[in-house]
């Protein structure tokens, strides 16, 4: 397990301190409108999904991050399947595309809750996002605390690592909504799914964000 996962609270506090420091230069202190950037690469790429928990989110950019690949792991009751994570990865052949949202600081705890930070499902870190046109921005991103053991080709994912069809469709719909390159959308579609196609709204509130390991 990533050692960072033992200190999610420290991560949040550190982030808040850094954020306060950087925003105070341009904005009045205690500004209610203080915001942060969030890089979404999973279901939160889709506007109607991110707005459930983060109504202040405004789409700013699309972009990709390097030194990571996309994978699926854990079992989400909400989605009835494995859910997306970034995995640190040294080879430069794989990139992770996503949507950069500008979110009001008051939604930060909601985002952490959605990502199950307090259950050690995901931890937050900062990444550099490459924006088409050559610019780069720093954004908050979430990575699963328990990463998949090894790389498996997307079309060969074993059952316990397959996302549900509804989850994968939410991701591809979000990617298409903001014009993420077509070849990346096809790459998303190449991940083997488990066929579950229930409504994404079902149980969103009922279940927390805890990821469990499928008992085999
Ligand atoms: C999955 O559900 C969506 C929405 O309910 C529907 O449009 C789509 O055709 C379904 N896909 C499959 C493969 O059944």
Image (tube, rainbow, N blue to C red):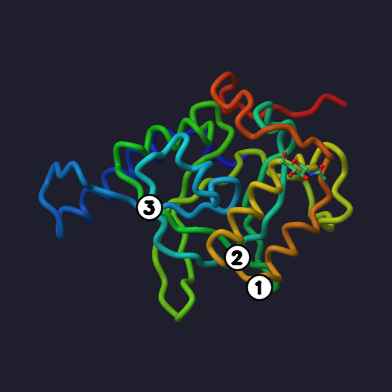
**Mark 3 touches mark 1? (CB < 8 Å):** no
Q: Which mark is drawn over residue 92?
A: 1
**Where does residue 214 sit, x and y in percent of width and height?**
79, 28
Residue at the left extreme, as displayed: 28
* Residue at x 70% of width, y 27% of height: 212
Using the image, determine if residue 36 lies above or below residue 51: below
Q: Residue at x 49, y 50 (%)?
A: 141
Where's the N terminus, which quadrant?
top right
Residue 4: horizontal and vertical position, in percent?
Answer: 51, 41
Measured along the vertical axis of the image, is residue 97 above or below residue 136?
above
Residue contact between numbered discs 2 and 1, judged by CB atoms under 8 Å:
yes
The image's mark for residue 67 is 2
Classify 10 Å Cα crowding around label 2: few (below 14), some (14-19), many (20 and above): some
Image point 51% across, 67% down: which residue? 63
**Residue reaching furthest to the top:** 206
User: Which residue corresponds to mark 3?
Assistant: 58
Q: Is mark 2 within 8 Å of ligand 1?
A: no
């Amino acid at each position: 397990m990533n050692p960072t996962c033992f200190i999610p609270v420290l991560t949040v506090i550190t982030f808040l301190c850094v954020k306060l420091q950087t925003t105070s230069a341009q904005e009045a202190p205690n500004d209610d409108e203080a915001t942060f950037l969030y890089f979404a690469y999973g279901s939160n790429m889709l506007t109607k999904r991110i707005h459930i928990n983060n109504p202040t989110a405004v789409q700013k950019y699309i972009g990709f991050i390097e030194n990571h690949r996309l994978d699926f792991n854990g079992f989400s009751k909400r989605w009835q399947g494995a859910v997306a994570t970034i995995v640190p990865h040294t080879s430069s052949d794989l990139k992770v595309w996503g949507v950069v949202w500008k979110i009001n600081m008051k939604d930060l705890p909601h985002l952490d809750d959605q990502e199950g930070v307090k259950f050690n499902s995901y931890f937050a870190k900062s990444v550099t996002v490459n924006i088409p046109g050559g610019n780069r921005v720093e954004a908050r991103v979430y990575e699963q605390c328990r990463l998949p053991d090894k790389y498996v080709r997307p079309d060969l994912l074993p059952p316990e690592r397959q996302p549900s069809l509804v989850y994968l469709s939410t991701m591809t719909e979000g990617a298409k909504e903001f014009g993420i390159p077509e070849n990346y959308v096809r790459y998303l579609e190449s991940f083997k799914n488990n066929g579950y196609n229930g409504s994404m709204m079902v149980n969103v509130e009922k279940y927390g964000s805890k990821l469990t390991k499928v008992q085999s």
